[in-house]
Image (tube, rainbow, N blue to C red):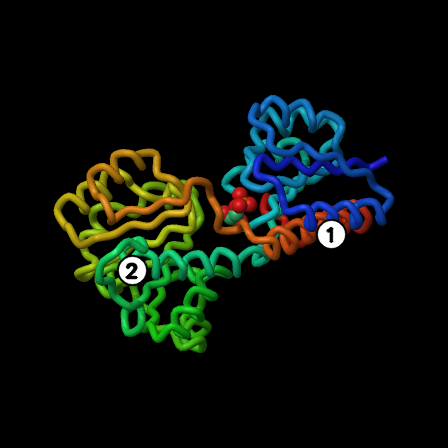
Amino acid sequence: MTKVLVATEKPFAKAAVDGIRKIVEDAGFTLALLEKYTDPNDLVKAVADADALIVRSDKVTKEVVEAGKNLKIVVRAGAGYDNLDLAACTAKGVVAMNTPGQNSNAVAELAIGMMIFMARGLFQPGTGTEIAGKKLGIHAYGNVGKLVAKYGKGFGMEVYAFDPFVAKEAMEKDGVKVVGSIEELYSTCHYVSLHIPANDKTKKSIGYELLSKMPKGGALINTARKEVIDEAGLVKAFTERADLKYATDIMADNHAELVEKFPGRVFSTPKKMGAETAEANINAGLASARQIVGFIKNGDKTFQVNK
Ligand code: 3PG
């Protein structure tokens, strides 16, 4: 019988697991759960007899892929799939998918929340500022960026965007001002909300050069990936500019240094929480289960990312 393993170091809400189970069992498959594991070897062991795997940010390494003797499909319940070893999947004939858009609203809401949190001095006593009337830069206009733009406009922000992969007209149709370069985005906007994926081109791409261009009081909001930040460059820019701020949903490797050197100007969630809403868990979890059933029963490869 087809076995679907849900391996989530950061588990889904119960309602999402119940929904996944129903979809899997209605299809005549069985469900196995590996939750809150701390040792990556537990995943290597658990995947041994699984036909399909659902993960979140869990690392699906070459070792995991090769340990899955019957593995046919891996679905990352979420957007970013930098945690999947795509080459290993392709080499073993395993289809890798993500579930684009399913958890975007949760991440977009957090980005706006973080902007307000930084504008109001981390909710500590004192006079803050408002986000209305400020310039918001959307760095990458995908599913999350598009929603942050919409909500930013709702708050009365002037919204700009840079994304070479999205047609200018599509962004302009949303009432967003399109800039021609990353440099222009950072030098124009008080807030920049990051939505680029982590890959060989983007890793360490946001650092001193861009941050030091930001207008007075500039704040970078990172609900993307910590790997895209050049942390040493950020320290340099923040040392020179006492007005810059950084809020991140992915704790920086040098978090202790940042908090010590720049008190009140840096905030990090303790554990990535962008997609941590019941709604996002249900949307992404159930989409993953449906995609697995669609692939195993009908060969549907929509959302395959290792083509
Ligand atoms: C994503 O890429 O979908 C988000 O970063 C969510 O990641 P998570 O499922 O680990 O919370």
Q: Is residue 149 visible?
A: yes
- On the image, the x and y values in percent for residue 294 come to 76, 51
Identify the residue at image location x=29%, y=34%: 256
Residue labelled with disc 2: 120
Q: Secondary structure at mark 1?
A: helix
Nearest the eye: 181 or 39: 39
- On the image, the x and y values in percent for residue 96 come to 63, 42
- On the image, the x and y values in percent for residue 277 come to 56, 53
**Quadrant in which the N terminus appears:** top right
Relative to 301, 243 lies left or right:
left
Q: How many numbered dots are placed on residues in this image?
A: 2
Q: Tag 1: residue type?
A: Arg
| Mark 1 CB lies closer than 8 A to ligand 1 | no
- On the image, the x and y values in percent for residue 287 come to 68, 53
Q: Tag 2: residue type?
A: Arg
Relative to 290, 137 lies left or right:
left
Residue labelled with disc 1: 290
Q: Earlier in the sequence, mark 1 or mark 2?
A: 2
